[in-house]
Amino acid sequence: MNIGIIGLPKSGKTTIFNALTGQEAEVAEYASSKVEPNVAVVDVGDTRVDQLSEMYQPKKTIYATIEFLDFVGGGSKGPGSEEGIFSGEGISLIKSSDALLLVLRNFSNSTLEQAHGAVDPTRDLENVESELILADQVIAERRVERLEADHKRGKKTSQSQAELKLMQRVVAKLEEGGGVRELELTVDDATLLKGFRFLTAKPALIVLNSDESSYGKNAEVVKRLEQRYPVIEFAGNFEMELSRLEPEEAEAFMADMGITESARTRLTSFAYKLLGYISFFTVGEDEVRAWTIRDGENAQQAAGTIHTDLAKGFIRAECFGYDDLIEAGSEKAVKSKGHFRLEGKEYRVKDGDILNIRFNV
């Protein structure tokens, strides 16, 4: 899973990126000409992986990971401008993200306010959404024009007619100021649109980036923003400094702020829940590992996450639950209690399942 961090210039995206990843990417009050994103892969802390590692004593323990991509700030001129992530080059980069993290400035800074206006997260969200919508409109309208031109030349099929109707719905929704994610789509519709990688189709979360003095005191702002997306509040600069401290020292400062978990832990668990991700595990003497899939994916899809050959040659999955293993104390006890199962390719994998894939290629 990768999450693209976006927002208006100087909203604190890189500060949030550093807080989440422990990196030290450059943070500045002034604009940068950089286009390439900062990239970091972080482990998703999971006490279940720790417990499984204690039980199996493997040679390697591998946690699930999230890749964060910190994109440069979006410009204010819309797609086609030469500035920011919403330019042509930036759009091609951000389309690779599975989900978007929208960072909104909620901290005071006289230099930034002169250049970008007073603090107003609601206004900034509207500006970011407008740019994403405009970027999608360019793609959708061009596709409609192309399909209509083909139909006039007699190149009309039932598939192209269906696509045209769908794209016209997309254009209409975007013109209303809505996103592609708001459309009611059939499975076939969703499959067709997937290739276009519309930005407004991606799952999105908001990070309200507050200063230390106002953190936890923005209930009304959070309530307004939650009408559009799930929201989590961070004191960005404070969290970035915490990420650079030793664990014991960081815990003391967190206690003073009333923060019980690090920014990384809070966001990864928040993202998993709200973006619909779950973890399953593979275990053994060589390796204990957590794998990430979307909730609702089946055993064959889970096998493909491990390796494409496992999906192609899938026979069945040996399966038991993490909770059953902890309660029973061993795999042998799990089997004796009747909790060990053989599942077919259509089995819907549950969070905490432990799988061993039987396959033949």
Image (tube, rainbow, N blue to C red):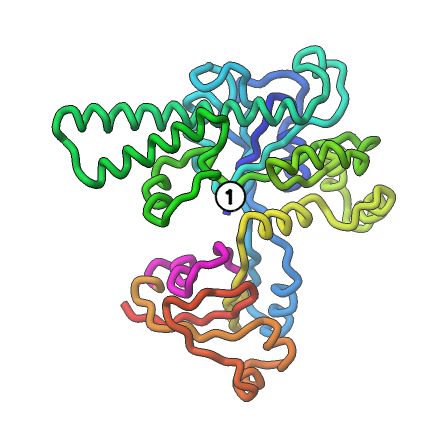
Q: Residue at x 78, y 50 (%)?
A: 260
Inspect the magenta stretch and tell me whether residue 77 lies in it: no
- In this view of the protein, which residue sits in the foreground, 123 or 112? 123
Magenta highlight range: 290-309
Circle count = 1
Residue identifier under label 1? 2
Q: Would residue 135 appear left or right of 65 to someone viewing this image?
A: left
Q: Quadrant of the C terminus?
A: bottom left
Q: Residue at x 52, y 65 (%)?
A: 350
Q: Residue at x 55, y 81 (%)?
A: 331
Res. 39 in view:
no
- In this view of the protein, which residue sits in the foreground, 347 or 352? 347
Residue 231, by quadrant, is top right
The x, y position of residue 66, in whole percent, is 55, 47
> Compared to 179, does 1 lie above or below?
below
Q: Would residue 306 appear left or right of 283 to someone viewing this image?
A: left
Q: Secondary structure at mark 1?
A: strand
- In this view of the protein, which residue sits in the foreground, 60 or 272? 272
Q: Would residue 188 appear left or right of 62 to someone viewing this image?
A: left
